[in-house]
Image: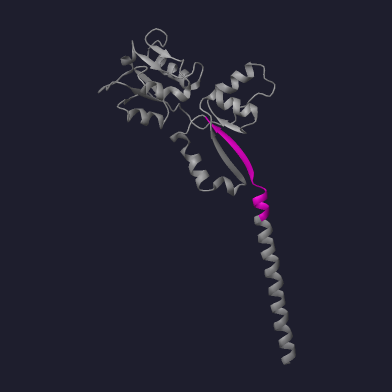
Amino acid sequence: MKNRVLVYILCGILIFIIAASVLFDFHSDHQNNTEKSMEKVTLAEVAHTIFYAPQYVAIENGYFEEYGIDVELILTSGADKVTAAVLSGDADIGFSGSEATIYVYNGGEKDYLKTFAQLTQKDGTFLVSRKKYDHFTLEDLKGKSVIGGRAGGMPEMTFEYALKQNGIDPKNDLEIDTSVAFAAMSGAFIGGQGDFVTLFEDSATICIQQNSYPVSLPSF
């Protein structure tokens, strides 16, 4: 009787050891397979901006890694630079205005880009002034010079759209400077160029810290 009990105990211990070994190996293999299956995605950003905050939080908290995605961010200032990065293969996807895909398609590129997601419903541009206005309206832009961004770029086009929606002619009522590259706009304004500048955050805050002033821009 005692021998039979001893046999049962030894069998139970053996089964436990085998089961533990199988589970441990499975867990290790699962971890290794997860690490091996991580797919790296290079993402070109037109700007580091507060509007992409959910993405930064997701990366920092490892949400993409849970789905096997290793995201690498690269900064390519300007939609034209984002487009070049994607077309050249330096980036897999890019964040920029959708006009970039249109320009590439109209240019006859066979391997053209495609817009597949909408991250924001409105343009994220802020209007910054060199002079302080206690009660600013868009009428105050008349006769002034505004650094508006690259001609044909989404920020510049939406700025003109907002002006037209408020009865201001962007061609005749003010001067919109489109000669300054996207990445150089805040520097040009800080250096003394223009009465106003359209900027994303945190470039707008940097300009404000240089004794410039934020002014209201209607939502569009």
Q: Residue furthest top?
A: 172
Would you place residue 172 above or below residue 29 in this image? Answer: above
Question: Residue visible at 55% across and 23% down?
Answer: 80
Of 17 and 8, which appears nearest the observer? Answer: 17
- Answer whether residue 110 is magenta in the image: no
Question: How far across and down, in percent of the image, does residue 109 sit?
Answer: 67, 19
The boundaries of the magenta stretch are 32-45
Q: Residue furthest bottom?
A: 1
Judge whether residue 145 can be spotted in this image.
Answer: yes
Number of marks in the rendered image: 0
**Could you tell me residue 165's position as x and y percent?**
41, 16
Measured as percent of width and height from the top left, residue 100 is found at 57, 22
Quarter occupied by the C terminus: top left
Residue at the outermost left position: 134
**Residue at 67% from the left image edge and 56% from the top image edge:** 30
Task: Residue at 43% x, 16% y: name it.
Answer: 160
Residue that appears at 39% across and 7% down: 172
- Front position in the image: 50 or 147: 147
